[in-house]
Amino acid sequence: MPGGSDAWRREPPPPDWELEDLLGDLFDNETVYGPTWAVAVAHRGAVIYERYSGRMDSWSDEGEVVGPETRLLSWSVAKSVLHAAVGILVGTGRMSLSDTAVHPLWRQPSDPRGSITLEDLLTMRDGLDFVEDYDPTSQRSDVIEMLFGGVSDMAGYAASKPLAASPGSRYSYSSGTSNIVSGTLAELVGFGEEYAAWLDDNLFRPLGMTSAQPTFDDKGTWVASSYLRATATDWLRFGELYLRDGLCADRRILPSGWVDHARRARSATPEDPHTFYGAHWWIDPSDPAGTFWADGYEGQTVTVCPGLDLVAVRFGKSPPGSNAIASWRRSFVSTLFARSGGLRQS
């Protein structure tokens, strides 16, 4: 994979893959997928497909024309990048998966939230009463209040929620949880500009993700539940880090075994029998190609497929609640796997 400022190699795809047939429908069938703005695919460390279309929505104007230099908003894909940031600190001994009382609000001896571990947080099994509901008409939506309600300290907002279940006992997806983890990082590396510089020095610049642009709340905590912008090919660079077991060229960015920590299935999800949650990443344990992925609202995805030596990214605006991108991903991977004879392409 390219590291530092190295440019991507660009090669044609294997001739029997017929990628335009598999990927063109993402752009051409808005009825099913909604607008697709960018798709890029890397195979064996080279970009083999790249296409852009349309304008990104904007509250203030008709939107930016999407192209290779467009910074694409992550939504919850950022959670998987947060997993990488945690891994760097675990690798240097500054964090441990067994750490407890990670937020100051939980450090009173009598606070039952003090038993929540970092592992519980990364696997969305912390037990906090946080409502992840994106319907603005809902009676209660903690995620909408946190992200759009003028909350100045998002980690503190999420950490203030009481327990609804014993830590470790149930899965409940929560953007608040990710921001608690991000707040914990900020206490170690510094808030605001210090946090941004740490991310750049330890993660983005070593990967060559020169376009990466995180957003911070008023306290100076990266809103890692939702807000990271980068170009499509820089999102490929992030996926390549996990495809290569945490290595970028010859440099180890993530500790050995940290990618396996991400893609070990912990919890079934009620929305899709093929989808399990790992640690800030998603997995289909039945997929023979070993596929796992970062997933964001409206169909943003960074898909990592070890069995094909492949990373694919899609950014756009799928209809809320649609499973179209999940269905496309399964079809895309299974088709390529079959066309490759079920053999790893590296």
Image (tube, grey):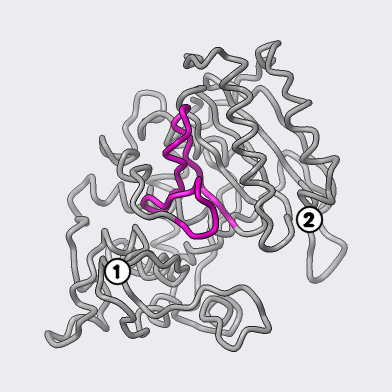
Numbered range of the magenta stretch: 269-296
Kind of residue at disc 2: Met
Q: Toward which corner of the image does residue 341 lie, by quadrant?
A: top right
Foreground pick, 208 / 171: 171
The reply to whether residue 192 is in sight is no
Which of discs 1 and 2 lies nearer the camera? The answer is 2
Q: Is residue 141 left or right of residue 70?
A: left
Query: What residue appears at the point 73 percent right and 55 percent down from the top-left corner?
Result: 318
Q: Are marks 1 and 2 in contact (CB under 8 Å)?
A: no
Q: Secondary structure at mark 1?
A: helix
Where is residue 241? Give x, y as percent. Answer: 43, 35
Magenta run includes residue 13? no
Foreground pick, 220 / 163: 163
Residue identified by numbered label 2 = 56
Q: CA distance from mark 1 to mark 2?
A: 34 Å
Query: What residue appears at the point 37 percent right and 45 percent down from the top-left corner?
Result: 202
Where is residue 137? Give x, y as percent. Answer: 68, 84
Residue identified by numbered label 1 = 187
Query: What residue appears at the point 37 percent right and 42 percent down from the top-left corner?
Result: 263
Q: Secondary structure at mark 2?
A: loop
Q: Is residue 156 left or right of residue 314?
A: left
The reply to whether residue 297 is in sight is yes
Kind of residue at disc 1: Glu
